């Protein structure tokens, strides 16, 4: 297939480029480096990523038959985007190209406006471009489990069958997003569903859990050039990454609030497999298909306990430290999302456990001198 990967310079984008290139597909990578600009704004950087995507692609293409092609393009520049769509006419588009941070979106009015404008309008530009230049392409859009929030009923995969006053209907599952970032993803889902219904394009919306992991089979081929990003900071860092970095620095693990909050998680290699499975099994024309892309659930306390045990096996003695929760969220809640579709299509999940956490600690230990402890505690609060 010809696969266009949007947001190719990111944590997921770059491994996805290498993964599909390794599988023998024609890969076209696109990015505008907006995440790197936010990193500069906040003085943060990935622990292990030094080379930009142009340098990494040059190195990758030296020893690969299916070379990756790169375009510097902002989805807000619709003319540039449309020229690329017309030239490539991809079979599938993997859309990661959005501002991905909930804390950043809650930082200020300016950050919230940028997040919604960048994500929602960029996605709309893409939909119009698909309609005009490649209506048969399969849009694989990265959503988030955070769109659902923590409702007091089971979370279905995107759709809900209801009966109201004796009449039945199938509707998009009601959403209770927890940040302006998650809201932008909800708007995306609504816009895409409308476009599939009216223009008969096809889309798989991957409502992804929190991704962890720093290695894939492709990053191992040349760690110097091919490593993906590892953020542990308070803007782009995720909870497992923060706990791993804190363990390496022999600092107590900072647990927000009670630690009872439950969330969905998956390994980065599982993300790649989910995208591949989606690409190999496209939806019907005019279908808006939703997969809940996660493999396991943990409370924050459970994650901390796993990392504490893994640290102990590396000779590091740490414990949990509870912080006042900077976020507005339910800390004790019902949480039962479904994730049957990708499993039925062949996904074989990787489990997060003490062994895997210990391996992550061992890898991050090599960068221990570059970890800045000032980024461990949250500076963005949902309510000031």
Image (tube, helix red, strand yellow):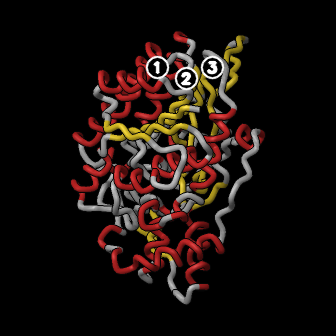
Q: Position of residue 308 (x, y in %)?
A: 56, 78
Tell me the SS state at disc 1. Answer: helix
Q: Residue at x 47, y 31 (%)?
A: 186
Say the numbered circle drawn on residue 130: 1
Say which of 318 and 115 sits in front: 115
User: Which percent across, then down, holds residue 273?
Assistant: 64, 47
Between 108 and 226, the residue placed more toward the observer is 226
Query: x, y (%) of residue 92?
Result: 55, 30
Which residue in the structure is indicated by mark 2? 137
Q: Residue at x 58, y 49 (%)?
A: 22
Q: From the viewer's perspective, is the residue at label 3 or at label 2 nearer?
A: 2
- Vertical side of 98 occupied by 271: above or below: below
Tell me: 305 left or right of 32: right
Residue 230 picture location, percent across and down: 43, 62
Q: Nearer the viewer, mark 1 or mark 3?
A: 1
Of label 1 and label 3, which has the lower sequence position?
Answer: 1
Give neighbour class at mark 2: few <14, some 14-19, many 20+ (Cα, 10 Å).
many
Near mark 3 (Cα within 10 A), the count class, few <14, some 14-19 or many ≥20, is some
Rendered view: 347 above or below 291: below
C-alpha span from label 1 to label 3: 15 Å
| Gap in angstroms between the C-alphas marked 3 and 2 | 12 Å
Circles 1, 2 touching at the beta carbon (< 8 Å)? yes
* Residue 287: assigned label: 3
């Amino acid at each position: 297939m010809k696969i266009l990967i949007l947001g190719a310079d990111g944590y997921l984008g770059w491994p996805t480029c290498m993964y599909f290139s390794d599988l023998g597909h024609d890969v076209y990578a696109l990015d505008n480096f907006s995440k790197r600009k936010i990193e500069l704004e906040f003085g943060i950087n990935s622990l292990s990523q030094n080379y930009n995507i142009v340098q990494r692609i040059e190195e990758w293409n030296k020893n690969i038959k299916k070379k990756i092609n790169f375009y510097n393009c902002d989805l807000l520049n619709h003319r540039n985007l449309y020229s690329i769509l017309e030239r490539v006419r991809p079979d599938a588009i993997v859309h990661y190209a959005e501002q991905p941070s909930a804390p950043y979106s809650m930082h200020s009015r300016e950050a919230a406006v940028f997040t919604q404008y960048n994500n929602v309008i960029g996605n709309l530009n893409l939909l119009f471009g698909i309609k005009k230049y490649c209506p048969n392409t399969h849009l694989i859009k990265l959503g988030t489990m955070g769109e659902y929030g923590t409702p007091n009923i089971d979370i279905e995969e995107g759709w809900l069958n209801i009966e109201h006053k004796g009449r039945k209907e199938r509707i998009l599952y009601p959403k209770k997003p927890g940040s302006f970032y998650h809201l932008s993803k909800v708007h995306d889902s609504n816009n895409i569903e409308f476009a599939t219904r009216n223009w008969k394009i096809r889309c798989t919306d991957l409502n992804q859990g929190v991704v962890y992991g720093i290695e894939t089979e492709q990053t191992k081929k040349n760690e110097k050039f091919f490593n993906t990003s590892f953020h542990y900071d308070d803007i782009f860092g995720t909870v497992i990454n923060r706990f791993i970095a804190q363990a390496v620095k022999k600092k107590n693990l900072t647990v927000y609030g009670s630690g009872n909050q439950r969330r969905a998680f998956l390994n980065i290699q599982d993300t790649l497999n989910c995208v591949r499975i989606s690409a190999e099994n496209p939806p019907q024309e005019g279908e808006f298909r939703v997969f809940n892309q996660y493999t396991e659930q943990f409370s924050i306390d459970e994650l901390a306990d796993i990392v504490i045990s893994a640290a102990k096996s590396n000779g590091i003695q740490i414990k949990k430290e509870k912080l006042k929760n900077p976020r507005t969220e339910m800390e004790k809640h019902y949480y039962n999302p479904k994730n049957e579709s990708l499993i039925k299509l062949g996904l074989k999940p990787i489990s997060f456990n003490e062994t895997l956490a210990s391996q992550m600690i061992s890898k991050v230990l090599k960068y221990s001198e570059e970890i800045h402890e000032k980024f461990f505690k949250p500076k963005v609060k949902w309510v000031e």
